[in-house]
Image (tube, rainbow, N blue to C red):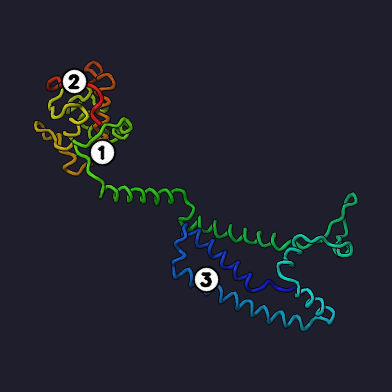
Amino acid sequence: MKPRTPVFVNFVIVVALLIIVYNMFVQNTSFFGSPYFWATIIIAGIMVFIANGIGDLIENNRFQKLSEEEKKAYLEDKKTPYYKRLWASAFKKQSNAEEQDMIIDHGFDGITELDNALPKWWLGLFYFGCIFCVVYVSAYAFTDYAHPVAEYEKEYKEQLAAIAEYEKTAPKITVETAKYDPANIPEGQQLFDSNCASCHGQGGKGGIGPNLTDDYWINVKEQDVFHNVFWMDENGSPNNPAMRAFIKEGVITGKDAEKIAAYIYHINQEIPPITQAQGGAAPQGEVAPWVKGTPRK
């Protein structure tokens, strides 16, 4: 009969396991402020002390059945501090006499096998690993915990909410404050394909609407292509109601228009135009007197 683990050690282990489980499912430390967490700790503590009390009763009953010599050995062993006993059970080397009692009746090449009990720290880690595996697999199978897709969706929604919150207080982009940035061209192309390509064609080559890659423009409201496109997105065309005021109607934001304008500036000023021979629409309007160079920043 060996002395039992002290109740305070069991309590610390239970609290540590509860913190790990809460952290697995909540994935942050906010649960420390939750009354449910502390209620769980209190209930778990009470159960640990109840289990310890039952263990004391069983231990006393077993102690009464020991011989006088076994009682003396047990009481002597119990005087040794718990951590010293734990260390000895994990790392203490047996004496030759102790080894003789543990030799298993077979071996090979002069090597004998001992029937040593596994160290408590090893057994503890093993059982903890088994329990953790069951909890983790169950959580993965029946909850959203540890699912990359669910985590991505959650973070994506949080980012969209943060962007929306920022845009509530961010200064609105207008034709006076819009700035050309080449980094906006890829997103501008995506926005153009979604909102403009149905009339102006893929790549701005023209269709129902005019070709946006040549020098001919029906409406010239600004000094450069970039700001002229932004003005059109904001106000629409005075000559054609099909070209709507996308910003004023709330279809796109000023930030979106800034990106679309960057893309159209790119296909109009930085790459060769799409001619009629290449499938582009015929010129419409007059040659625009654009200011040469990159739009003002």
Q: Residue furthest left?
A: 239
Marks 3 and 2: in contact by CB < 8 Å? Answer: no
Q: For mark 2, does the 10 Å Cα neighbourhood hold few (<14), some (14 to 19), or many (20 or more) residues?
A: some
Query: CB of mark 2 within 8 Å of CB of mark 1?
Result: no
Which disc is residue 95 wearing?
A: none
Left or right: residue 236 compared with residue 117: left
Which is more N-terminal, label 1 or label 2?
A: 2
In the displayed structure, does residue 20 sit left or right of residue 271?
Answer: right
143 with respect to 180 (left or right): right
Q: Height in image: 188 above or below 26? A: above
Disc on the earlier residue, 1 or 3: 3
> Splitting the image into 4 quarters, where does residue 95 fall?
bottom right
The first of marks 2 and 3 along the sequence is 3
Measure the C-alpha gap from mark 2 to mark 1.
Answer: 24 Å
Q: Which residue is mark 1?
A: 256
Residue marked by disc 2 = 215
Query: Could you give the CA–CA distance between mark 2 and mark 3, rounded to whole angstroms?
Result: 74 Å
The quadrant where residue 228 appears: top left
Q: Is residue 84 above or below residue 147?
A: below
* Crowding at mark 1 (Cα within 10 Å: few <14, some 14-19, many 20+): many
Q: Which residue is mark 3?
A: 41
Graded by Cα atoms within 10 Å as few (under 14), some (14 to 19) or many (20 or more), the crowding at tag 3 reads: some
